[in-house]
Amino acid sequence: MSATIKDVARLAGVSVATVSRVLNDLPGYSEETRVKVLDAVAELKYQPNAIARGLVNKRTQTIGVLFPSVSSAFSSEILHGIEEAAQERGYSVVVCNTAEDGKRTMKYLQVLREKQVDGIIFSSGVLKEEYDQTLRAMEVPVVLVSTKSEYADIPYVKVDDHQAAYDACAYLIRQGHRRIAMISGPAHDEIAGEPRIAGFRAALADHGLPAGEAPVLDGRFHFAGGCKAAEQLLRQSPEVTAVFAAGDEMAIAVISTAARLGIAVPEQLSVIGYDNLKLAEMCYPPLTTVAQPLAEMGRLAAAKLMARIETGQPEGSEIMPHQIIGRGTVSTRE
């Protein structure tokens, strides 16, 4: 049976309140008493309960993170940055998989409320009104990562999706491509769908190409959806010489589908992705892509959240830099 704080107090010959003050580094005891308490803690192998400790300092040193797909390479890279920053500051991380449609979000918000987390990082989804109301009722700070919201008091950390997509399309144009298609996310997705489609079309228009005629197919931001969209595109639009895929999994799906159809990448078809996941270096040819600094985004979001937890001061939003990483899937057209 695990030792309790009462056991520690009894062995040290002090009150429970004194043990609590020592463990939480509060004043009101002598150096001799502090040594007695710490010796008792070591002898009993006492592990302070985070919730009980929170009753004293009003914090549990725990943050919650909500992802729509915890197992995805995208989420894991952001989470890596979050956990690194949290561990450095003595915080634990509770990760919740809300599912792609967010159907478990309300359930997990209740779980995080019961665990008395000090703050929440919300990632890669729309912060719906019902979520916002629940979060405000919890009275804990919130930071968004790879998403944004209409609520000005909730800071976010993300890249400029419109500009990043614009730059990806412009890169293909500079390589001499004129017949360019896009495998996108859902057009109704206001976070990563619509802005990337708009950026792609803006680049075409600004370079004198017919933006309205360029094929745009929904690949649902995953490999299976990308394969389906790529097959439809390559069979129906054989004149296309380059594809911008708004996610690396979809870009790899284009490469895979092209190989199955006997289309050589990049000799016959150039492909550029988006995210710069580790998968981008593992496929063949290695994928040219727009890099988001995912781990750094996670680290910064966690740092902003912990600063707000500890100071109570508001934190500003931040647009992170993106860059194009040239590898082996884009060729130059004369």
Image: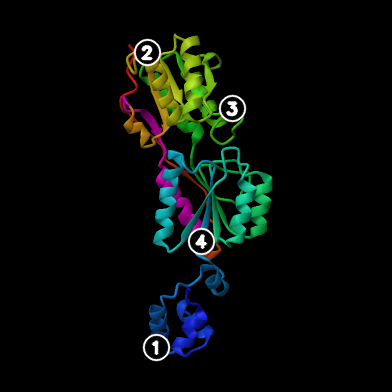
N-terminal label among 2 and 3: 3
Number of residues whose C-alpha sits closer than 10 Å to that of mark 2, classed few (under 14), some (14–19) or many (20 or more): some
Whether residue 112 is in magenta: the answer is no
Residue at the disc numbered 4:
62
Can residue 299 be seen? no
- Which residue is most to the front? 1
* Residues tagged 4 and 1 counted as in contact (Cβ below 8 A): no
Residue at the disc numbered 3:
187
Residue at the disc numbered 1:
31
Mark 2 → mark 3, Cα distance in angstroms: 28 Å
N-terminal label among 2 and 4: 4
Disc 2 is placed on an element classified as: loop
Residue at the disc numbered 2:
263
Q: Quadrant of the C terminus?
A: top left
Disc 4 is placed on an element classified as: strand
* Residue range of the region highlighted in magenta in the rendering: 284-306
Give how far across and how far down residue 71 sits, in percent. Answer: 46, 41
N-terminal label among 1 and 2: 1
